[in-house]
Amino acid sequence: MRLCVCVKEVPSSLVSLRLDPDSRRLVRGKGRLNAPDVHALEEALRLRDEAGDGEVVLVSMAPEHAVDALRHGLAMGADRASLIADPALAGSDLVVTARVLAAALERERPDLILFGWESSDSGGAMLWAAVGERLGLPVLSRVWELRTDDGTVWGRRQMEYGFDVVQAALPCAVAISGAINAPRHPSLKGLVASKRTEVDRLSVADLGLAPSDVGETGARTRVLGLRRPPEREHGTMIEDDEHAAEQLIEHLIERGVL
Amino acid sequence: MSPSTLVFVEEREGELVPGSLGLLAKAAELGGEPVALLCGSGVRDLAEELGNWGAARVLVAEAPELDGPLAQPRVDVLAGVLERGGYDTVLFENSALTADVAAALAARLYAGVNWDLVDLRMEDGELVGERLAVGDTVLVDVAWTGEPRIAVVRRGILDPSAEGARTADIESVDVAVDERSTRVALVERSSDRSQKTSIETAEVVVAGGRGIGERDNLRLLEELAEALGGAVGVTMPLVDRGWYPYAHQVGQTGHTVRPRLYLACGISGAVQHRVGMEKSGTIVAINSDPTAPIFRYSDVGVVGDMLEIVPRLTQLIRDRGLSA
């Protein structure tokens, strides 16, 4: 079984994330693997190990510096990694990103494609559906529990009201929810091996796309400008001096809440 | 020119999702006559209600494949409707179902999709979306290149409005679901599929976050909630630890609540929490860290130990016979 995990590099903290007023793009800087993607990777490693054979491949569309984040994934136990790093990709939007990832995934012909939950820097919890659509694959999203057996995949899916169970035949794309497993730490052996594993580099041309297909020219959305959101008026503050509960109750009575 | 807007109205267990009705009012505000698309099985009666919320016309797509909350058959319906022409904008309210529908539709039509929008407006004849980014510290104005423009609005942001109530024309649309779109099967439905969980209907929500420290301390929140006749809410980390059921989770990946009184106890107030409760009436935060972000969006903030303050509040409310 070949399992591909789509991963993204995100800043180590929101503090190092900013919007560049000139390019109007998120400046991410060097970071780590998006935490939910690490859970997706752990699921892939578990499925590979349970099956006793197979291959886990990391696929990422990111700037060159994401290679270190990918090495972390290799150290955890992924077999290979493919990095689509191309300056032409800057400014790509969701449909372009889906097109590029789908083109890279097509080369791998995976049985299962795994995605993490929303990325911590943009909250775009929908990329998998666009990638699945482009590849013509069934998609199971918001999966909290994943099982495969003889070419079928089951997912316990988190809905607004509770959990449904959905099922599809492989090949299939699955977006898991953030906290469904405890990701393993890289072993010393894994760390050593990850340094020796070559990360494949793919350019836009390698994927059969023209530079104008991607980036800002290929995008179907654009950013007009950035503003500071209106500040909410600061509320009343109460310091706890043994009487905070009483003061709070008085406030709430005054406001007509109690 | 005003947009020709198609509003995807979500039906869940025989009820219309309120936020998706709010899209109809927003579409009317943008100009033009909003048209609603309602997909499901046996939803014709619900379609009649949509005029009350401002739909000029309702397209009803009914088929057995549209019975469960699966995205692909709905993408087929939308693509068919859009192919026949007449719409340049499609609006969704974000949900487990619609996020997948909107993204797959965008990929199929190679159309622009902007998501997590908190508002939409027309500016010089162009549709502009407003999106909060970087932990809600930056407001980004976004637009679309080409049509159709697909917009996904953050959950719980838009209120339905009966102002534009009218009698809507209702028409059936032909449903042609591709075989490829039926490959995901729904094999088991959740036993509890009620539209609203207790925290969504409660007038008071007493919510706890990581600051509660130990699982046993949830009892303090339950007692205060009981004294106020409210419900207990929790943040994602507590649900992840298995301390409380998902039905009580407030926030981006949980539920959106709008009680009259929201008490945040030991919640630092990350944006993922904020989006699930910021429309509450009065927001009270109790946190020992005076720099916690929650205080920036609270009406009343108490700096102190919730483990001491919460039981005192419960006691005072009981002793004085207060109610919310």
Image (spheres, coloured by chain):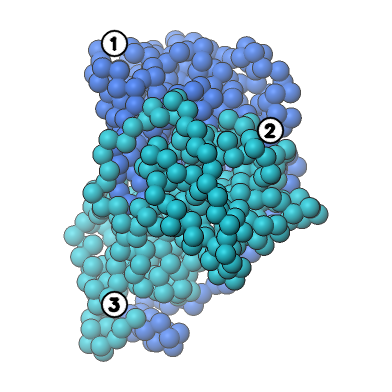
Chain colours: A blue, B cyan
Residue depicted at 40% across the width and 37% down the height: B65
Q: Quadrant of the N terminus of chain A?
A: top left
**Regarding mark 1 in the picture, which secondary structure is present there?**
loop
Q: Nearer the viewer, residue A178 or B65?
A: B65
Q: Is residue A92 visible?
A: yes
**Regarding mark 2 in the picture, which secondary structure is present there?**
loop
**Regarding mark 3 in the picture, which secondary structure is present there?**
helix
Residue at the spot of label 1? A53
Report the Cα–Cα distance between label 3 and label 1.
57 Å
- Give the chain of mark 3: B
Residue at the spot of label 2? A219
> A114 left or right of B176?
left
Name the disc covering residue A88, or none: none
Q: Residue type at mark 3?
A: Leu
Q: Nearer the viewer, residue B142 or B32?
A: B32
> B190 left or right of B154?
left
x then y, percent, for residue A168? 34, 26
